[in-house]
Image (spheres, rainbow, N blue to C red):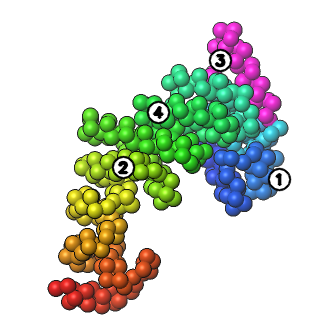
Amino acid sequence: ISTIGKHYVLEGKLKVAIYSALAKKNYNYYKTTPEKRLAACKELLGNNTYIKLQSFYRNKINQGDRNEKEISILLLCKGLISLEDKAAIENIITNDLQQLREGKDIDVSITYIASVGLCYLDSDIGIDFIESAFAASKLSENYKSLGFEALVILNKRDIIKRNAEKYLTTDNTALAYLAFIEFSNYYRATELYVYAINRLKYMENLYNQKGAFTQNEERFIHEISNILWDAKYEELLDRDEILTLKQFSKTMLNSSSKNIRIPAAKILSKICDNNDVKEIDLLLQDKSSQILSYGLDAILRLPESSQKIYIPKLIALLDSENNDVSSQALYNIRRYLGEKDNNQPAISEQEFITHKKRIKALFM
């Protein structure tokens, strides 16, 4: 790793460590204060190491090249949580903006990073610059992601709402994906689910036009599916939203991409009913064992009379080379027979063989 690369690795690892330390105390990294993050940082590093690192990166802000200045600002704001340097970094932005007004050339990347960093120190002095940088559409994905996370960490609802409404609904899928990843750390309620449902509608229309998705679009669908699966599990979606989810899943099951069929299968397995037997059959015929398993989950949602239809298929799956599939097929059959409750404890290989012989004899 290059010298500057090592500093970026430190910044990332330190952030993760602080995140974990806060979580152990039931604090949300994205909704806590700079003071709490600072306390977690000092506890992790020890006061002496904290002071040495802080001094090192403080000097780099004044003496380093562009890359060194950027990572030093991020470390002092996100990792080391240096409240002492807040005024100095605010001065960078103030001076840069003044020079821009005077028509002078400056390295705006430093201005942007300083604006991002200050959000972690609870200062919104650079918010206008961050938002104008988004609008200019010249930022790399990494810089955009930094900016979105900074808006979340600042934890000011009006700013978050304004940007969420703008970027979660944009036609630029890559930008919407980055926004969704970061804003989902703030929104875990109705507002995020509304954005997610509307984005699925948009993606379905896009799929119907193109017949396929880009890699970014596939990643986005996975993220949305996970959020909405959680929402359904917690019974936070209304009837119309569930119907939208179902329609999207049915459309995506016809995709040639396994990466798209998997989230569609996962969702459908939790919302299917007797009207979806065609789709359940598709799941059970899929070559992906993961999708097939979701088909087995789906069967359990059907009434007993409908489950009976799938007994021959389930018996055939007892011979599957995939242990997870064969075990789940056995569980389904035993549930149908009233032998199992909702829990699915592991059984030994010998127990499996015994049940398999007994069930085959029972139905054949």
- Point out residue 90 in the picture as x, y percentages from the top left corner: 76, 28
Q: Give the residue at mark 2.
A: 243
Which residue occupies the foreground of this view, 253 or 238? 238
Q: Give the residue at mark 3.
A: 106
Which residue occupies the foreground of this view, 54 or 82? 82
Earlier-in-chain disc, 4 versus 2? 4
Amino acid type, label 4? Thr
Locate residue 245 relative to residue 127 in the image: left or right: left
The answer to whether residue 291 is seen in the rendering is: yes
Amino acid type, label 2? Leu
Range shown magenta = 85-109
- Point out residue 171 in the picture as x, y percentages from the top left corner: 41, 30
Residue located 27% across and 38% down the image:
208
Earlier-in-chain disc, 2 versus 1? 1
Q: Give the residue at mark 4.
A: 169
Q: Give the residue at mark 1.
A: 47
Q: Nearer the viewer, mark 4 or mark 1?
A: 4
Chief secondary structure of the magenta portion: helix
Earlier-in-chain disc, 4 versus 1? 1
| Mark 1 neighbour density, 10 Å: few (under 14) some (14–19) many (20 or more) | few
